[in-house]
Image (cartoon, rainbow, N blue to C red):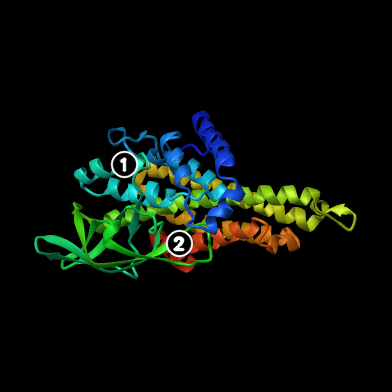
C-alpha cells in the first residue's frame, strides 16, 4: 500500500492542475453555472488531449489501463476547480457500470466513444425511483421516472437499473427516447435531472448479478466522489489561508489571531486525514477488491463531513465577503453540501459503515 503519490502521479496532478487553471478558471465556471453548466470544448480536450476519461478503461477499449489511484488524482483537481464537465457521470459511474456487467458487446461499442468524449453516458440507479422494464413486441421498454440523475440533461446514453418480473436488470437507453427535466438545485455547478421513460425502447445489458454490479459501482463512486471532495477541501484551505494573510482588522492581519490560526490548523489536519483515507480507498479499488466496500464506506463517512466543515469555515473566515455572490466561497459550500447527500444521507452512510464493521 502506498499513500504517497509516485512521480508519475504527481506529474499527472500537475498537468491537470495547470490545464484547468488555463481553461476552467473561476470566471468560466460561473458563466456556465448560469447557463447550461457544461463546457463541451473542455470535455473534448480533457478526453482527446489529456486522455483523462479512460484512465480505468483497458487499452483494448481505447483507455490507458491505469487505475483508480490515477483517476482519484484527476478527480481531486476537477473538484478543486469545480470543472463544468460530466466526468463523474460518464468517466466514473457509467464507465464502472460497463466494466462491471458481463456485456462484452456493449463495452466494445460504448467505451471507445466514451473515452474519446464523443459520447456522454449517465447512470439512473436511484433506489427511491426505479423504472420498470417490460418485454413488449420482442423488445424491452422502460416506464417510470429516474430521479436526480447526474448530468442526465446532456447524456447521449443512459444506463438504467430497472425492475423486471424476476428482480432487477441493467439496460441502456438512448437520450432521444427519454423526457428530461433539469432540476434547480442548491449547487449550480453540478446538474441533476429527472428522466421520464414512457415505453422507451431499451437494450438489456448482460449481467449475472445486477445487484452486485450496483454495489461495486456504488463503492467506486464513493471513492471517486471523496477524491473530488478532497480537492475541494484543498482549494478552500488555500484560498482561506491566502485571505487571512492580507485581511487586516484592528491593525493586524487576521491570520495572526490565535482563533483563526486554530481554525486553519483544524482544516489542515482534516485535509491530511482525508487525503490518507482517499489514497487508501483508491488503492483498494486497484489492489484489494475484498477490502473496497469497507474502505469506500469509511472514506465517505470521513471525507464528506470534513469537506462540508471546511467549506463552512471558509465562508465564516472570509467574513462579509464570504457570504456574497461575487466570492467563490459559496460555490464550494454548495458543492460540499450536495456532494454530502449525493450517495445517501450522513446517517445512511454511517449505518452502512456500522453494518460492514458488524457493530
Dot 2 or dot 1, earlier in sequence? 1
Q: Can residue 93 be seen in this view?
A: yes
Residue at 32% x, 70% y: name it. 129
Element marked by disc 1: helix
Q: Residue at label 1? A: 113
Please give the name of the residue rendered at 28% of the width and 48% of the height, measured from the top-left corner: 98
Whether residue 79 sits left or right of residue 158 in the image: it is right
145 and 33: which one is in front? 33
Q: Residue 228 location in percent, x, y?
A: 51, 50
Foreground pick, 188 / 206: 188
Query: Which residue: 27% across, 33% down?
Result: 60
Closer mark to the observer between disc 2 and disc 1: 1
- Image quarter for residue 141? bottom left
Q: Which of 174 and 111 is in front in this view?
A: 174
Residue 194: percent from the left, percent from the top?
37, 66
Q: Name the residue under label 2.
A: 342
Quarter placement of the C terminus: bottom left
Q: Is residue 54 above or below residue 178?
A: above
In the rendered image of this protein, does residue 6 appear above or below residue 277? above
Q: Residues within 10 Å of mark 1 (few under 14, many from 20)?
A: some
The residue shown at (30%, 42%) is 111
At which x and y percent is residue 47? 41, 39
Quarter of image, res 115: top left
Disc 2 is placed on an element classified as: helix
Amino acid at each position: 500500500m502506498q499513500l504517497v503519490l509516485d512521480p508519475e502521479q504527481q506529474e499527472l496532478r500537475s498537468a491537470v492542475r495547470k490545464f484547468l487553471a488555463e481553461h476552467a478558471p473561476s470566471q468560466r465556471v460561473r458563466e456556465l453555472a448560469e447557463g447550461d453548466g457544461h463546457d463541451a470544448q473542455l470535455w473534448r480536450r480533457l478526453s482527446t488531449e489529456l486522455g483523462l476519461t479512460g484512465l480505468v478503461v483497458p487499452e483494448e477499449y481505447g483507455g490507458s489501463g491505469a487505475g483508480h489511484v490515477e483517476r482519484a488524482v484527476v478527480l481531486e483537481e476537477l473538484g478543486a476547480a469545480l470543472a463544468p464537465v460530466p466526468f463523474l457521470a460518464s468517466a466514473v459511474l457509467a464507465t464502472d457500470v460497463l466494466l462491471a456487467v458481463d456485456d462484452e458487446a456493449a463495452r466494445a461499442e460504448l467505451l471507445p466513444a466514451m473515452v474519446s468524449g464523443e459520447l456522454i453516458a449517465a447512470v439512473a440507479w436511484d433506489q427511491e425511483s426505479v423504472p420498470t422494464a417490460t418485454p413488449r413486441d420482442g423488445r424491452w421498454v422502460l416506464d417510470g421516472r429516474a430521479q436526480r440523475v447526474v448530468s442526465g440533461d446532456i447524456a447521449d446514453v443512459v444506463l438504467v437499473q430497472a425492475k423486471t418480473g424476476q428482480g432487477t436488470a441493467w439496460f441502456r437507453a438512448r437520450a432521444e427516447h427519454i423526457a428530461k427535466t433539469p432540476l434547480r438545485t442548491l449547487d449550480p455547478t453540478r446538474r441533476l435531472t429527472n428522466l421520464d421513460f414512457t415505453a422507451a425502447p431499451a437494450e438489456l445489458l448482460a449481467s449475472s448479478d445486477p445487484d452486485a454490479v450496483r454495489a461495486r459501482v456504488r463503492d467506486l463512486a464513493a471513492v471517486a466522489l471523496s477524491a473530488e471532495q478532497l480537492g475541494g477541501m484543498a482549494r478552500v484551505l488555500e484560498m482561506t489561508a491566502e485571505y487571512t494573510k492580507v485581511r487586516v482588522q484592528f491593525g493586524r492581519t487576521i491570520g495572526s489571531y490565535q482563533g483563526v490560526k486554530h481554525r486553519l490548523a483544524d482544516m489542515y489536519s482534516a485535509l491530511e486525514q482525508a487525503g490518507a483515507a482517499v489514497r487508501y480507498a483508491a488503492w483498494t479499488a486497484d489492489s484489494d477488491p475484498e477490502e473496497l466496500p469497507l474502505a469506500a464506506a469509511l472514506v465517505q463517512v470521513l471525507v464528506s463531513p470534513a469537506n462540508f466543515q471546511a467549506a463552512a469555515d471558509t465562508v465564516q473566515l472570509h467574513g462579509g465577503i464570504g457570504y456574497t455572490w461575487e466570492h467563490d466561497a459559496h460555490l464550494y459550500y454548495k458543492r460540499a453540501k450536495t456532494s454530502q447527500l449525493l450517495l445517501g444521507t450522513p446517517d445512511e452512510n454511517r449505518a452502512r459503515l456500522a453494518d460492514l464493521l458488524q457493530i
